[in-house]
Amino acid sequence: MSNLPNINTGQLTSMFSSRLSSAYNQLRGDLGAPQTATETIDKLVDRINTSAAVEDRRTAVLGLKGLSRDWKEDVGFRAMTPLIAVLEHDAPYDVEIAKAALETLMQLCETAEKPAKDDLGLKFTDAFLEQPKPLHTLLSLLSNSPSFYPRFYSLQYLSQLLTSRPSVAQSYIMSAPPPGVDGILSVLDPAPPPGSNNNESGQQQQPQLGGGATEMLRNEALLLLPAMLAGNADLQKIVAFSGAFERLFQIIDSEGGVEGGIVVQDALTVIGCLLRFNVSNQNYFRELSLIPAIPRIIGFPSPLPADVPSPDEFALQYWPEQKIYNTGLVLGLIRMLVGGPGGGNQTAMVTGGVTRSLLELSLASNAPNGIKSQALNTLTPILLSSPANQDLLSSLLISPLVAVHADEEHPNGGFVRIPNKPTAVSLVTAVIDGDPSAGGRGLRGRAAGVNMFEAYVSGNDDARIGILSSMIAPPLDNPNANFPDQPQSAGSLILSGLLDLPHSSEIQFDPYRPLFSCLLLSHLIRNSEHAKKLARDISISSGDSGDSAIADDEDKVSLVQLVVGNLMMAAREQTDCVNRAAKEGLTHGPSPEEEDWTRVMVGYLVLLCTWLWDSPKTVKEFLSESANLQVLIQPITQTTGIDPLVQGLSAFLLGVCYEFNREPGEITRATLHPILHSRIGPDQFVSRMARLREDPRFRAVQPDAFDTEGTDATAAAVADGETDELDEGLELWFDWAFVDFWKNHYYTIQRSIAIDPDAVRGSGPVDDGETAAIIMSLRQKLKAQTDEVVQLQSKLEALTKENKQEKDTLVHEVDSLSSQIATLTTQLQETASSRSTLEEELSTLRNEHESLKTVAASAASTKSELESVSAELSSLQANHEKASSELGLAKASSKFRETKLKDLEAKVKDLEEKAKSAPPAARVDNSALEESQKANEDKTKEIDELKKSLEDSKAALEKAEKASSEKKELEDKLKSSNDKFKSSEEKSKELEEKTLTLEKKIEELETKLKASSASASANDNDNNANTGGGSGKQAKKRVAELDSKVKELEKSLEEEKQKREEESKEHEDLLVLLDELTAKRNVDKKKLKENGLEVSDDEDEEE
């Protein structure tokens, strides 16, 4: 519509009117003459074939659509080919013409519910499917059309074609070019969110529609797929490998699992079509890891740890009719996936949480009884011969629900979850007492529980022994007796249901309780002599036997005798019911009470037949009481007032006693033979068993008699509140396990009575018939023994596996010990190498010790030199002090004399100048002159004396300077001695560091030697048996040598330490002397300065 030019409404109306009027005129014909339907159809077909305008062809197709309702045959024969041409050429580009063409074809190909061979719809369907191209066009239109109606009608037309001609349509779909099947499955994809781009990966962009339109197409595709997949395994594989499982599970999850409506039902139906009878798809389903998604569909939070209880939301749910139907379909899918025992899907069920969810659904929820019975029937193949699933049931604890009536504590009634109990106990409780959440009702679920119990104990000897070991009655002082929910074991529950009977027919009781208890015990002991022995060893005192028929206050009674006693009591009560009915004149049939007691008798006889079969010791115990034979003989010989089932089972049990009476006792085969041939008779014996085989109640028992699916299961589950009405027409006398057992062995028992009592003990066979009977008996025995051998082989394999694991553990330990020995050997080698290293270090220490000795000797000589130098220094200091004092005096006198001399010389110069400057003519006084001459002479003498004293002082100064130079030399010697002393100190410090490192090394060596000695001793203890202790003695010897060497090293180190301590003392003495000399030097310098002597700069710096 977006490609049309912009025109107003009036123009559009006038255009449509003109085209409609022209089409009407053409149909009307010339001059308005009326036309027949055939002529009109021909003209419309001609318009389709010749008109170039799409509008004209669309109008013609719409006309054919209107005529096809009333003139289906004419339109079909004349217009089928043009309609197919329109579908191929015009429909992909025009939505309206596509819609009209598809609607017309659907009307032409429509058939009756049960079409006849000449049905017009089938003929036109064959015409459409004459070539594959029209159907390929439908698939292309479904994949590529951008509009809703072409795709919607394409799906409906495909469904119609597949219903009418499935094989042809399926072959055309398989040969269709791409997208083909993918185009159909793409309809199942959810609608993309607005604004998303589906063409990011370069694939063909799918047409986008609104959410409602997408869901309508999806729902129509779900209706199409079952018809498309029916009976074609190859097409099922193609669809499965094209991603159908993932898409379908996505739809189920989006709809909320089983809470969803009819869409979930359709999706589950498609999954069932893909899985039913298709092993390849079943394996592919498991490989896709979709099995763990099944619990999520039924609302169970998987994976859930075994120690975490199931949530209340799962245990308590609302169950509308659609949810019940969807859950039944899920259970059916699980049964398809499991198949037979030993498959890979059994393990996937337990790892994926399916087994846990089904156990919780069937035994600890408020699901309808129909769903619970289906869940139990689904668990039966899962548990059969599957140790993983059986172990889960043995270890799992569940919390069942109990229905409560309205009271003060629970005003509205409802359900209460009881404390956790083992799943096996809950299963036995549900079978014997009925479903507690349904008030004990639900025969269908109880029967399904019997089948599940059989699968649980089949091949599971641990479970059998565990339950049989717990078959003891609670003590009289049971501390739990006052509790409303007394904790009981599975065995005690079976024993209680087996032995507790009312004393009178007037008391209302559940006859199925002892019947189901007998069936459960039969499954525990079937084909296992060990289990039969455990049951045979059970004995109960009369006080603990409750309401059983046998009462003995002193001795304990075995379980076999208790069962026979209850059988006697049931027979007596049944006879009383018959007599009471005869007195009352009731002849229309057995009363309900009589039928109940008959059912109880059937249960006990079924148990005894299973127990005594191929168990001579049990037969001996049964025949230990002569009255027990009368319990079997009386029903066989009785003509009226007894049920044929009881007669046939009694005859079979008597034959079993005759066949397997091989232990010595009071009643032997010879005793039984005349009873069978004289008192009963072979004909009557065979007739009783034949009557049992032909009884409708016996023949009605089938393997899946209570395994209902589909509509029956839904009807049973929906009518949850009408369980009594459902169970009213349902009765149970046997389970399939016993019926199969009886059918396999009744011929052997029938022929066994014809064998001479002593024939089996060694006498040859009487005739070929007897030989055949013996062979059949031996075959049956061989089969049972073969089963036991298989079980023993499985145990042997388990023990072999355990031994292998132990062997692997021992090998691992030996390897670890070998590695430890190798480690110890390497440690010994390392000890030897460390020993050589220690020897080298010891030699190095010895060399260093010798060098230390030389250093000590040089230090001693240095000490003697220092002593002599100090003596010389002390003498020099004394001389120096004396010279310094004299020098000070000389310097002072010399200075005084010099100053005086200078004054005299100045005076002399003044006199000389005055003399020169005196006038010659002046008259000089002679006396004055003489006096002056004398004075001059005196001055001259003084000058000479001063000069002499000056020279003496200079000589004294030279002596003092010489003494100071000598002092300087002595100080230089002292400085050199100090340097030597400092070097000796540095060497002593280095020696101390070396000594510390050596001590550390020695400590490390000592620790290594101790570790090596310990490892050597351990190695000696570990390897003493193999090596005779040789390597250990060598290691001890080497350790002793290393210890002695370490002791020598320690001794030498102690001596070295003593020498070093002495040297350090000598060094300390030298340091004290040096300090004293330095102090004396400082005192001398101070005195020199005080006396006026100068001290050189280097001396000041030394200060």
Image (cartoon, helix red, strand yellow):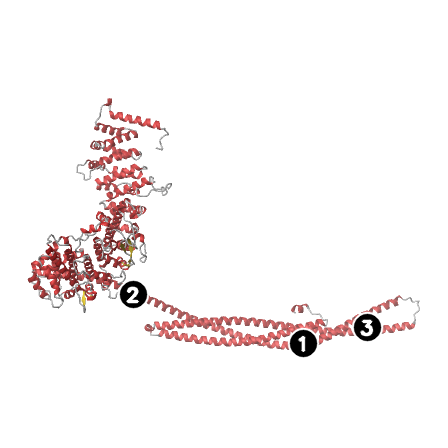
For label 2, the residue is: 806
Which is more N-terminal, label 3 or label 2?
2
Q: Which residue is mark 1?
A: 876
Labels 1 and 2 touching (C-beta < 8 A): no
Asked whether, in this view, residue 469 is left or right of residue 631, the answer is right
Q: What's the distance in space between the residues labelled 2 and 3, CA to CA? A: 131 Å
Secondary structure at numbered mark 3: helix
Residue with the mark numbered 3: 943
Please, what is the three-letter code of the amino acid marked with disc 3? Ile
Of 144 and 379, which appears nearest the observer?
Answer: 379
Name the mark nearer the viewer: 1 or 2.
2
Q: Horizontal and vertical percent for residue 1054?
A: 50, 76
Left or right placement of residue 931 versus residue 1091 in this view: right
Q: Are marks 1 and 3 in contact (CB under 8 Å)?
A: no
**Image quarter in which the N terminus is found:** top left
Q: Amino acid at mark 2?
A: Glu
Measured Cα–Cα span from mark 1 to mark 3: 36 Å
Q: Looking at numbered disc 1 in the image, what kind of residue is underneath it? A: Leu
Distance of label 1 from label 2 (alpha carbons): 98 Å
Residue 1003: x and y in percent read 46, 72
SS label for mark 1: helix
Which residue is more in the foreground, 772 or 389? 389
User: Residue lying furthest top in this view?
Assistant: 31
Location of residue 973 by image quarter:
bottom right
> Mark 3: few, some, or many residues within 10 Å (few <14, many ≥20)?
some
Packing grade of label 1 (10 A; few <14, some 14-19, many >=20) is: some
Circle 2: element type: helix
